[in-house]
Image: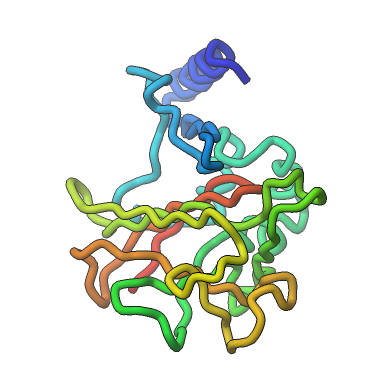
Amino acid sequence: MDREDLRQRREFLKGLAVAAGGVVLLPYVSACSSNGRAETAAAEAGAEGVSDPPLAKPSGWDPIAYNRTRGNAGAIPDSYLPDINGQDGVNMHLGKHLPYIVEANGAPAGYLPLMWGDPAKGYVRHPNAPKSEANNYEGHWYNWIRVRKAVEGDAEELESEFTEWPADDPMKYLVLGGGDLTADSGKNTIYLVEMPKDVQSGDTVRIWAHCLTHGEYVDFLTV
């Protein structure tokens, strides 16, 4: 999709919002840079901009509904939309991409141990895979994860990058229960995400992350 197509799509969505007298989520647009990291194309969007996730946790927050709506607006690849909108979309696909905090022996201070797809909620656990011909040499893991204290106004936001999976780096991943990171399709992978200095125990944080294969997902967690 070129820049003109994106502009026309945003204008169309804005028109829908005006006609409905409500608000329509505008797509968050990503472009892949030379190091494989998805970058915001907000600079290209100019004054029109692209909607970012809310800074603080909204009242009645529903991460499934929010991520489905935002995904259909452009945050999730078109090829994955039939899955998230299908009969098993919640447990098999959207829930699989939502973060949750785990207790992890060996997690360094100042880092949040995250996994994806909480089985306690009935969600399928998120697998991970290295770059290979089977996945167009892209791999399947979360290549960036942003953490911010969930408050209105200014707050520090840190982004942790994960350029490879698996990685022989104790500051990147741990394994739930120990053992081989690649066992069970990589589902026991714990991501170690650096937290901003202003985040303390009991605070709510916003997690905004990008799966190489399936796009962006947002949720709010209590540390």
x, y percentage for residue 211? Answer: 58, 51
Q: Quadrant of residue 118?
A: bottom right
Picture coordinates of residue 160 (x, y %)? 40, 57
| Residue in front for this viewpoint, 204 or 196 | 196
Image height of 222 relative to 96, above or below:
below
82 to 149, vertically: above or below: above
Residue at image point 54% right, 11% down = 4
6 in relation to 153, above or below: above
Q: Quadrant of the N terminus?
A: top right
Front residue (pair 35, 158):
35
Figure coloring: rainbow
- Left or right? Give the position of 162 relative to 137: left
Residue placed most toward the observer, 200 or 183: 183
Count of numbered marks:
0
Where is residue 149 drawn, in percent x and y? 27, 59
Residue 47 horizontal/vertical position (percent): 33, 17
Which image quarter holds the C terminus? bottom left
Question: Can the viewer see residue 102 in this picture?
Answer: yes
The residue lying at 75 percent from left, 58 percent from top is: 88
Q: Residue at x 40, y 61 (%)?
A: 220
Look at the image and tell me whether residue 218 can be seen. Answer: no
At 73% from the left and 70% from the top, the residue drawn is 185
Is residue 45 left or right of 5 when viewed as pictured?
Answer: left
Q: Is residue 206 above or below residue 199?
A: above
Question: In this rendering, would 211 be left or right of 85?
Answer: left
**Residue occupying the far right of the picture:** 134
